[in-house]
Image (cartoon, rainbow, N blue to C red):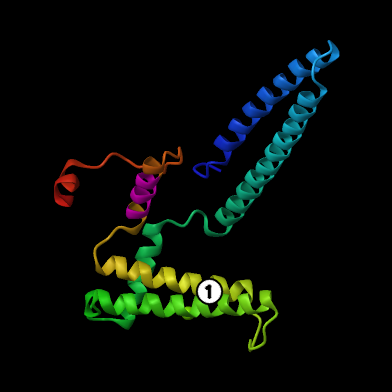
Amino acid sequence: MPGCGLDERLIALTEQLAEANARADEWRNQAEGGGSHHWNKLYRAECLQRQDDVARIGAEREAAEARAAQMFERTKGLTFNEFRSANVARCLKWHPQGIASWSASDWLTAVTGELGELASLLKMRNRERDGLPGNKFSPTNRQVADELADVLTYLDLLAAMLGVDLGLAAAKKFNEVSERVGFPDRIALQPEPEQSKEKEK
Ligand SMILES: [Mg+2]
């Protein structure tokens, strides 16, 4: 799955596994020639651990790829822009005076209201985890997904009201954070046009 960093981790682990195997072979040769069985055992244990890591991360990557493929199949890779377009068009039916008829603070209140609904469902899940009474129902995955979607819908309207391209902002910030912490994960972006560079200053 591009950008998730699993490929890089898998490659690094595979290299480490090859090194550990080479060290184990070297020590086995020495052990056969009267060297230390103790070190040979340690390196063998390291190899087994590396094999487990490689298998685990390989399975994690396959699962991530399968999830991404499944998601793409349903939404055909829905973009931020497509979502924004439908979201604002529908919003104008509620707010015929325009999206700016609500302030940023009004939209933010709507976002936090939806976050509260999401938090309430997750609180119920925490109670279930801890075997505590008090839940009126058991939150389903669908209910949790619905509240996440409500958060996104209002967050997108807040961004629209503020004139923020949410997809672009998310990608730029993602890349900035990766750069700062030294991770290789990047989201590909087209070069920035000169005029918008000027505008941002
Ligand atoms: Mg809701």
> Which residue is outermost to the top?
33
> Height in image: 174 above or below 120?
above
Q: Is residue 191 left or right of residue 50?
A: left
Beta carbon at label 1 within 8 Å of ligand 1: yes
Q: Considering depth in this image, is 133 or 153 the residue closer to the camera? A: 133
Q: Which residue is mark 1?
A: 146
Q: Considering depth in this image, is 66 or 144 the residue closer to the camera? A: 144
Q: Is residue 70 left or right of residue 159?
A: right
> Height in image: 15 above or below 164?
above
Amino acid type for the residue under numbered disc 1? Asp
Q: Is residue 198 left or right of residue 88?
A: left
**Could you say where residue 136 lies in the image, as x and y percent from the top left?**
63, 89
- Secondary structure of the magenta portion, mostly? helix
**Could you say where residue 67 lies in the image, as x and y percent from the top left?**
62, 53
Q: Residues within 10 Å of mark 1 (few under 14, many from 20)?
A: some
Q: Residue at x 49, y 53 (%)?
A: 77
- Magenta segment, which residues? 169-177
> Height in image: 128 above or below 77?
below
Q: Considering depth in this image, is 91 or 68 the residue closer to the camera? A: 68
**Could you say where residue 18 lies in the image, as x and y percent from the top left?**
68, 24
- Is residue 175 part of the magenta span, yes or no? yes
Q: Residue at x 63, y 44 (%)?
A: 61
Q: Residue at x 66, y 49 (%)?
A: 63
- Is residue 21 part of the magenta span, yes or no? no
As helix, strand or loop, the secondary structure at mark 1 comes to helix
Q: Residue at x 46, y 41 (%)?
A: 185
